[in-house]
Image: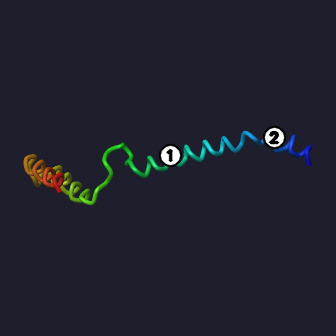
Amino acid sequence: MVAMMDGLSMGFVWVWPVLLVAGVAVLVWGLSRATTTGSGSRAPSRDEPARQILRERFARGEITEQEYRERMRVLDEH
């Protein structure tokens, strides 16, 4: 049994620290992905559909730039 400890298990002593470091790295990566969006901008909010509708209406010319900015400001305040 002593020979087994010297040969086989001593060769794998470095595996546990590597697995620990890899696990911590994956955990940090996962948490950072969960708290940010793709471009690092603000997290999606419940008023995101309203913002998207405003962007689409402005792009189609249904509202003026002044109306667009005013309505976005109102969304920012609430």
Q: Amino acid at mark 2?
A: Met
Q: Tell me where residue 10 appears, x and y as whole percent.
A: 81, 40
**Disc 1 on helix, strand or loop?**
helix
Query: Looking at the image, which residue is at 16% across and 53% down?
Result: 77
Rendered view: 15 above or below 60 = above
Q: Amino acid at mark 1?
A: Val
Q: Tell me where residue 71 appears, x and y as whole percent.
A: 12, 53
Disc 2 from disc 1: Cα separation: 30 Å
Q: Tell me where residue 14 appears, x and y as whole percent.
A: 72, 39
Q: Is residue 73 left or right of residue 5?
A: left
Q: Tell me where residue 37 appears, x and y as whole percent.
A: 37, 48
How dense is the environment of label 2, judged by Cα within 10 Å: few (below 14), some, or many (20 and up)? Answer: few
- Asked if labels 1 and 2 touch by Cβ distance under 8 angstroms, the answer is no
- Res. 10 mark: 2
Rendering quarter of residue 24: top right
Query: Looking at the image, which residue is at 18% across and 52% down?
Result: 76
Residue hosting label 1: 28
How dense is the environment of label 1, judged by Cα within 10 Å: few (below 14), some, or many (20 and up)? Answer: few
Sequence-earlier tag: 2 or 1? 2
Pick the front one: 20 or 41 = 20
Q: Is residue 57 left or right of residue 2?
A: left
Q: Is residue 39 left or right of residue 27?
A: left
**Disc 2 on helix, strand or loop?**
helix
